[in-house]
Image (cartoon, rainbow, N blue to C red):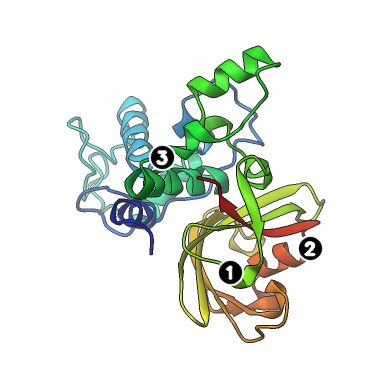
Amino acid sequence: MLSPKAQKLLNDYFHLPLGEVKDVRCPYFNNARLKQRAQLRVLIGKGTPNEIVEEAKIISIQYHAGLFDKAGHCCLHNEHTGKKVNSDEIRKFLIDHNLGVECSGFVTQILRVNFQETKNVDIARKFFIVSPRYFFRWFISLLRPVENISVRRYIDNRNTKKIDWSETQTGDVIVMLETGPNNKHNHILLITDKTVDTIFYAHARAWSSEGKYGHGVAKGIIKISDKNGSLLNQSWEELGFINEKNETWLEAKNAKILEVRRILI
Protein backbone atom coordinates (compact mmCIF):
# COMPACT_ATOMS: atom_id res chain seq x y z
CA MET A 1 0.00 0.00 0.00
CA LEU A 2 0.97 3.64 -0.27
CA SER A 3 2.57 5.29 2.75
CA PRO A 4 0.18 6.71 5.38
CA LYS A 5 0.72 10.32 4.30
CA ALA A 6 0.31 9.41 0.63
CA GLN A 7 -2.91 7.53 1.41
CA LYS A 8 -4.21 10.59 3.27
CA LEU A 9 -3.36 12.83 0.33
CA LEU A 10 -5.10 10.41 -2.04
CA ASN A 11 -8.17 10.44 0.21
CA ASP A 12 -8.11 14.25 0.34
CA TYR A 13 -8.38 14.40 -3.46
CA PHE A 14 -11.51 12.26 -3.23
CA HIS A 15 -12.87 14.18 -0.24
CA LEU A 16 -11.55 17.73 -0.49
CA PRO A 17 -10.85 19.22 2.98
CA LEU A 18 -13.83 21.57 3.08
CA GLY A 19 -14.80 21.28 6.73
CA GLU A 20 -18.43 20.34 7.24
CA VAL A 21 -19.21 20.05 3.53
CA LYS A 22 -18.26 16.45 2.83
CA ASP A 23 -17.52 14.23 -0.15
CA VAL A 24 -16.50 16.85 -2.70
CA ARG A 25 -14.49 14.91 -5.27
CA CYS A 26 -11.71 16.91 -6.90
CA PRO A 27 -12.57 17.78 -10.53
CA TYR A 28 -10.27 17.24 -13.48
CA PHE A 29 -8.60 20.29 -14.95
CA ASN A 30 -6.02 20.36 -17.74
CA ASN A 31 -4.26 23.62 -18.49
CA ALA A 32 -3.49 22.60 -22.10
CA ARG A 33 -6.67 24.24 -23.35
CA LEU A 34 -6.01 27.59 -21.65
CA LYS A 35 -2.21 27.42 -22.11
CA GLN A 36 -1.49 29.62 -19.12
CA ARG A 37 2.17 30.04 -18.25
CA ALA A 38 3.98 31.12 -15.09
CA GLN A 39 0.85 30.55 -13.02
CA LEU A 40 0.62 29.10 -9.53
CA ARG A 41 0.55 25.32 -9.80
CA VAL A 42 -2.97 25.23 -8.34
CA LEU A 43 -4.14 27.24 -11.37
CA ILE A 44 -2.67 24.82 -13.92
CA GLY A 45 -3.94 21.52 -12.54
CA LYS A 46 -0.91 20.65 -10.42
CA GLY A 47 -2.09 21.65 -6.94
CA THR A 48 -2.63 19.69 -3.75
CA PRO A 49 -6.13 19.36 -2.23
CA ASN A 50 -5.33 22.07 0.34
CA GLU A 51 -4.08 24.43 -2.37
CA ILE A 52 -7.25 23.86 -4.41
CA VAL A 53 -9.46 24.59 -1.40
CA GLU A 54 -7.49 27.71 -0.46
CA GLU A 55 -7.75 29.08 -4.00
CA ALA A 56 -11.50 28.36 -4.01
CA LYS A 57 -11.82 30.38 -0.80
CA ILE A 58 -9.99 33.33 -2.36
CA ILE A 59 -12.16 33.27 -5.48
CA SER A 60 -15.40 32.89 -3.50
CA ILE A 61 -14.60 35.82 -1.24
CA GLN A 62 -13.24 37.97 -4.08
CA TYR A 63 -16.32 37.46 -6.26
CA HIS A 64 -18.83 37.33 -3.39
CA ALA A 65 -19.98 33.83 -4.31
CA GLY A 66 -21.06 33.17 -0.73
CA LEU A 67 -19.72 29.61 -0.55
CA PHE A 68 -17.03 30.57 1.97
CA ASP A 69 -17.38 33.07 4.78
CA LYS A 70 -14.90 35.88 5.41
CA ALA A 71 -12.96 33.65 7.78
CA GLY A 72 -12.45 31.14 4.97
CA HIS A 73 -14.80 28.46 6.29
CA CYS A 74 -16.94 26.58 3.81
CA CYS A 75 -20.55 27.55 4.51
CA LEU A 76 -23.28 24.98 5.05
CA HIS A 77 -25.66 27.60 3.66
CA ASN A 78 -24.91 30.15 0.97
CA GLU A 79 -24.34 33.48 2.71
CA HIS A 80 -26.35 35.34 0.05
CA THR A 81 -29.22 32.99 -0.79
CA GLY A 82 -29.51 31.07 2.48
CA LYS A 83 -29.83 27.86 0.48
CA LYS A 84 -28.04 24.75 1.69
CA VAL A 85 -24.65 24.21 0.03
CA ASN A 86 -24.08 20.66 -1.20
CA SER A 87 -21.11 18.89 -2.72
CA ASP A 88 -22.46 19.25 -6.28
CA GLU A 89 -22.67 23.04 -5.91
CA ILE A 90 -19.07 23.20 -4.67
CA ARG A 91 -17.87 20.97 -7.54
CA LYS A 92 -19.67 23.16 -10.05
CA PHE A 93 -18.03 26.24 -8.54
CA LEU A 94 -14.58 24.61 -8.78
CA ILE A 95 -15.10 23.54 -12.39
CA ASP A 96 -16.50 26.92 -13.47
CA HIS A 97 -13.37 28.55 -12.06
CA ASN A 98 -10.90 26.05 -13.56
CA LEU A 99 -9.88 24.49 -10.26
CA GLY A 100 -8.97 20.83 -10.24
CA VAL A 101 -6.10 18.48 -10.95
CA GLU A 102 -4.79 16.83 -14.09
CA CYS A 103 -3.41 13.32 -14.34
CA SER A 104 0.35 13.93 -14.03
CA GLY A 105 -0.13 16.52 -11.28
CA PHE A 106 -2.28 14.07 -9.31
CA VAL A 107 0.26 11.24 -9.66
CA THR A 108 3.28 13.45 -8.94
CA GLN A 109 1.84 14.95 -5.77
CA ILE A 110 0.96 11.54 -4.32
CA LEU A 111 4.19 9.80 -5.32
CA ARG A 112 6.21 12.74 -4.06
CA VAL A 113 4.73 12.31 -0.57
CA ASN A 114 4.99 8.52 -0.79
CA PHE A 115 8.71 8.47 -1.56
CA GLN A 116 9.53 11.29 0.82
CA GLU A 117 7.98 9.24 3.62
CA THR A 118 9.32 5.81 2.61
CA LYS A 119 12.68 6.59 0.96
CA ASN A 120 13.41 10.16 2.07
CA VAL A 121 13.62 11.06 -1.62
CA ASP A 122 11.85 13.95 -3.35
CA ILE A 123 11.16 12.58 -6.82
CA ALA A 124 10.12 16.02 -8.10
CA ARG A 125 13.66 17.24 -7.39
CA LYS A 126 15.25 14.03 -8.64
CA PHE A 127 13.41 13.74 -11.96
CA PHE A 128 15.14 14.69 -15.18
CA ILE A 129 12.92 17.34 -16.75
CA VAL A 130 15.05 19.28 -19.22
CA SER A 131 18.72 19.44 -20.17
CA PRO A 132 20.88 22.22 -18.64
CA ARG A 133 21.75 23.15 -22.24
CA TYR A 134 18.38 24.91 -22.33
CA PHE A 135 19.36 27.06 -19.41
CA PHE A 136 16.21 29.13 -18.93
CA ARG A 137 13.82 26.16 -19.09
CA TRP A 138 16.20 24.11 -16.92
CA PHE A 139 16.37 26.86 -14.32
CA ILE A 140 12.58 27.21 -14.26
CA SER A 141 12.26 23.44 -13.82
CA LEU A 142 14.51 23.63 -10.76
CA LEU A 143 12.30 26.29 -9.23
CA ARG A 144 9.00 24.71 -10.27
CA PRO A 145 9.55 20.96 -10.71
CA VAL A 146 5.98 19.76 -10.11
CA GLU A 147 4.62 22.24 -12.66
CA ASN A 148 7.02 20.89 -15.29
CA ILE A 149 6.59 17.14 -14.81
CA SER A 150 4.35 15.92 -17.62
CA VAL A 151 3.23 12.39 -18.48
CA ARG A 152 6.19 12.07 -20.87
CA ARG A 153 8.63 12.54 -18.01
CA TYR A 154 7.31 9.27 -16.58
CA ILE A 155 8.32 7.35 -19.67
CA ASP A 156 11.84 8.79 -19.73
CA ASN A 157 14.39 6.07 -18.94
CA ARG A 158 16.29 8.55 -16.77
CA ASN A 159 13.30 8.71 -14.42
CA THR A 160 11.62 5.33 -14.66
CA LYS A 161 12.16 1.84 -16.00
CA LYS A 162 9.76 -0.28 -18.00
CA ILE A 163 8.54 -3.43 -16.25
CA ASP A 164 6.30 -6.33 -17.20
CA TRP A 165 2.74 -5.70 -16.09
CA SER A 166 2.79 -8.92 -14.05
CA GLU A 167 5.48 -7.40 -11.80
CA THR A 168 3.33 -4.37 -10.95
CA GLN A 169 3.48 -3.12 -7.37
CA THR A 170 2.26 -0.14 -5.36
CA GLY A 171 3.81 3.10 -6.57
CA ASP A 172 4.21 1.99 -10.19
CA VAL A 173 2.47 3.86 -12.99
CA ILE A 174 0.68 2.91 -16.19
CA VAL A 175 1.54 5.35 -18.96
CA MET A 176 -0.49 5.88 -22.14
CA LEU A 177 0.93 8.02 -24.93
CA GLU A 178 -0.82 9.38 -28.01
CA THR A 179 -4.30 8.13 -27.31
CA GLY A 180 -7.76 9.66 -27.48
CA PRO A 181 -9.84 10.65 -30.54
CA ASN A 182 -6.98 12.53 -32.23
CA ASN A 183 -4.11 10.50 -30.77
CA LYS A 184 -2.84 13.64 -29.04
CA HIS A 185 -3.74 12.77 -25.45
CA ASN A 186 -1.27 11.39 -22.90
CA HIS A 187 -2.49 9.83 -19.67
CA ILE A 188 -1.14 8.19 -16.51
CA LEU A 189 -2.58 5.93 -13.81
CA LEU A 190 -1.14 5.44 -10.33
CA ILE A 191 -1.03 1.91 -8.90
CA THR A 192 -2.25 2.32 -5.34
CA ASP A 193 -2.23 -1.33 -4.28
CA LYS A 194 -1.72 -4.85 -5.62
CA THR A 195 -2.96 -8.24 -4.50
CA VAL A 196 -2.53 -11.69 -6.04
CA ASP A 197 -5.39 -11.20 -8.49
CA THR A 198 -6.14 -7.46 -8.52
CA ILE A 199 -4.35 -4.23 -9.41
CA PHE A 200 -5.88 -1.12 -7.85
CA TYR A 201 -5.39 2.22 -9.59
CA ALA A 202 -6.37 5.87 -9.23
CA HIS A 203 -6.17 8.77 -11.66
CA ALA A 204 -7.56 12.16 -12.63
CA ARG A 205 -9.56 12.01 -15.83
CA ALA A 206 -12.49 13.33 -17.83
CA TRP A 207 -14.61 10.74 -19.60
CA SER A 208 -16.50 12.02 -22.64
CA SER A 209 -19.68 10.44 -21.26
CA GLU A 210 -19.56 12.55 -18.07
CA GLY A 211 -20.16 15.95 -19.59
CA LYS A 212 -19.00 19.26 -18.15
CA TYR A 213 -19.48 18.51 -14.46
CA GLY A 214 -19.09 14.74 -14.01
CA HIS A 215 -15.33 14.34 -14.34
CA GLY A 216 -12.65 14.19 -11.65
CA VAL A 217 -10.40 11.86 -9.72
CA ALA A 218 -11.47 8.22 -9.92
CA LYS A 219 -10.50 4.74 -8.84
CA GLY A 220 -10.57 1.47 -10.73
CA ILE A 221 -9.37 -2.09 -10.60
CA ILE A 222 -7.72 -4.47 -13.03
CA LYS A 223 -8.76 -8.04 -12.27
CA ILE A 224 -6.10 -10.48 -13.38
CA SER A 225 -7.96 -13.13 -15.37
CA ASP A 226 -5.28 -14.16 -17.87
CA LYS A 227 -1.77 -14.25 -16.39
CA ASN A 228 -0.27 -15.18 -19.76
CA GLY A 229 -2.06 -12.42 -21.63
CA SER A 230 -1.27 -8.73 -22.00
CA LEU A 231 -2.39 -6.00 -19.63
CA LEU A 232 -5.29 -5.30 -22.00
CA ASN A 233 -6.41 -8.94 -21.76
CA GLN A 234 -7.29 -8.43 -18.11
CA SER A 235 -10.63 -7.12 -16.81
CA TRP A 236 -10.52 -3.34 -16.29
CA GLU A 237 -13.40 -2.11 -14.14
CA GLU A 238 -14.26 1.48 -13.23
CA LEU A 239 -17.58 2.88 -12.02
CA GLY A 240 -19.16 -0.47 -12.83
CA PHE A 241 -18.03 -0.36 -16.47
CA ILE A 242 -15.77 -3.12 -17.81
CA ASN A 243 -13.32 -3.03 -20.75
CA GLU A 244 -15.12 -1.86 -23.92
CA LYS A 245 -17.55 0.17 -21.79
CA ASN A 246 -14.72 1.55 -19.63
CA GLU A 247 -13.25 4.67 -21.25
CA THR A 248 -9.98 4.19 -19.37
CA TRP A 249 -9.53 0.75 -20.95
CA LEU A 250 -10.38 2.20 -24.36
CA GLU A 251 -7.72 4.89 -23.91
CA ALA A 252 -5.21 2.19 -22.98
CA LYS A 253 -6.23 0.09 -26.00
CA ASN A 254 -5.91 3.02 -28.41
CA ALA A 255 -2.61 4.31 -27.02
CA LYS A 256 0.39 4.24 -29.34
CA ILE A 257 2.51 3.39 -26.28
CA LEU A 258 1.14 1.57 -23.23
CA GLU A 259 3.71 0.75 -20.55
CA VAL A 260 3.99 -0.01 -16.86
CA ARG A 261 6.87 1.99 -15.39
CA ARG A 262 8.67 2.03 -12.04
CA ILE A 263 10.27 5.13 -10.49
CA LEU A 264 14.07 4.98 -10.29
CA ILE A 265 15.20 5.78 -6.76
Report the Cα–Cα distance between label 3 and label 1.
23 Å
Residue holding disc 1: 167
Give the residue at x 38% y 55%. Answer: 10
- Residue 100 % position (x, y): 47, 43
Looking at the rendered structure, the kind of residue marked 1 is Glu
**Residue 97 seen in the current view:** no
Quarter of the image where one finds residue 64: top left
Label 3 CA crowd tier, 10 Å (few <14, some 14–19, many 20+): some
Give the residue at x 75% y 67%. Answer: 253
Q: Is residue 75 above or below residue 231?
A: above
- Discs 1, 2 touching: Cβ within 8 Å: no
Looking at the rendered structure, the kind of residue marked 2 is Asn
Q: Of the numbered discs in the image, which one, if any, rests on residue 121?
A: 3
Residue holding disc 2: 254
Give the residue at x 64% y 68%. Answer: 165
- Residue 179 % position (x, y): 76, 55
Between disc 1 and disc 2, the foreground one is 1
Between disc 2 and disc 3, the foreground one is 3
- Residue 148 % position (x, y): 58, 31
Label 1 CA crowd tier, 10 Å (few <14, some 14–19, many 20+): few
Direction from residue 99 to residue 189 in the image, left or right: right
Direction from residue 20 to residue 113 in the image, left or right: right
**Residue 234 seen in the current view:** yes
Report the Cα–Cα distance between label 1 and label 2.
23 Å
Give the residue at x 22% y 45%. Answer: 75
Q: Nearer the viewer, residue 215 or 155?
A: 155
Asked which secondary structure carries label 1, the reply is helix
Asked which secondary structure carries label 3, the reply is loop
Report the Cα–Cα distance between label 2 and label 3.
34 Å
- Residue 119 % position (x, y): 38, 46
